[in-house]
Image (cartoon, rainbow, N blue to C red):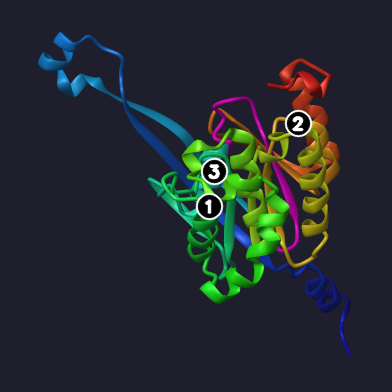
Amino acid sequence: METNSEIVSSKSKKEIAITVKNLHVTYRGLKKTSIRASWTKLGSRVELFRALKGVSFEVEKGKILGIIGKNGSGKSTMLRAIAGIFSPDEGKIDLHGNTISLLSIGVGFNKKLTGKENIYLSGMLLGFSEEQIREKEQEIIDFADIGKFMYKPVKTYSSGMYSKLAFAITAILETDIMLIDEVLSVGDAQFKAKSYNKMKELISDENRTVLIVSHNLDTIASLCDEVLWLNDGNLMEIGPAEEILPRYREFMGQQDPEKES
């Protein structure tokens, strides 16, 4: 017979999909300087920017986590680090064996290849076989709905067409963890509605974990269980959306989410 403590313990056990511990990411760039100065003081041109400063959190399997913060807070850097695009300077990221995909404008396509060729390239990078991708190819083409541009180099695409193809690939080739960076706000009104509805369908799967970066607080409030708030590379708060969002709006000194930038 189970004791009360055993029952509580079993109920409290949660399957973790993502663990981030003490994550630090620093960019190394060049300061603006004159050509003459660059010849004489090359070493002084290096500039460091600490994008993430010791961030730690966990995401339960099946949760939808919204990531908010003003521009430059480290939101996109966080997603790229979790996706394996950026290597942390310090800290650890554990995906607990889950497959992962990043949906972000400007990430993941070879712009010299056609849209169709990029379907296969992206799919194989996500770990799918050529046969698995072929089975989903027409569904991706139909969902993207970019017509003859599917057979043209991606470098000829508008941001809207790029977004449509990126979203179609990630939405149709489903992974355990989906990372979404602002793409729900790109594209024409019809595609926005279609992608929003598809996203709601995808995240209804209790086994899929989703992280969404967005400045649209209405989207965060309607889709996300919890919210992680970053500010200048630091974790401010993480918790239920209905608790964090009002405090974030107050911090930003505004009540109208449409004016968030």
Per the image, label 2 sits on a secondary structure element best described as loop
Compared with residue 98, is residue 87 higher up or lower down, i.e. above or below?
above
Q: How many labels does the image show?
A: 3
Res. 82 mark:
1
Q: Is residue 72 magenta?
A: yes
Q: What stretch is highlighted in magenta?
A: 61-75
Compared with residue 47, is residue 136 higher up or lower down, i.e. above or below?
below
Residue behind mark 3 = 78
Per the image, label 3 sits on a secondary structure element best described as helix
Q: Can residue 60 be seen in this view?
A: no
Q: Which of 145 and 48 is in front in this view?
A: 145
Quarter of the image that includes the C terminus: top right
What residue do we see at 49% from left, 66% from top?
124
Compared with residue 116, is residue 163 higher up or lower down, i.e. above or below?
above
Assess whether mark 1 and mark 2 are in contact (beta carbons under 8 angstroms): no
Which of the 4 image quarters holds residue 42? top left
Residue 246: x and y in percent read 83, 29
Q: Is residue 74 left or right of residue 169?
A: left
Res. 216 mark:
2
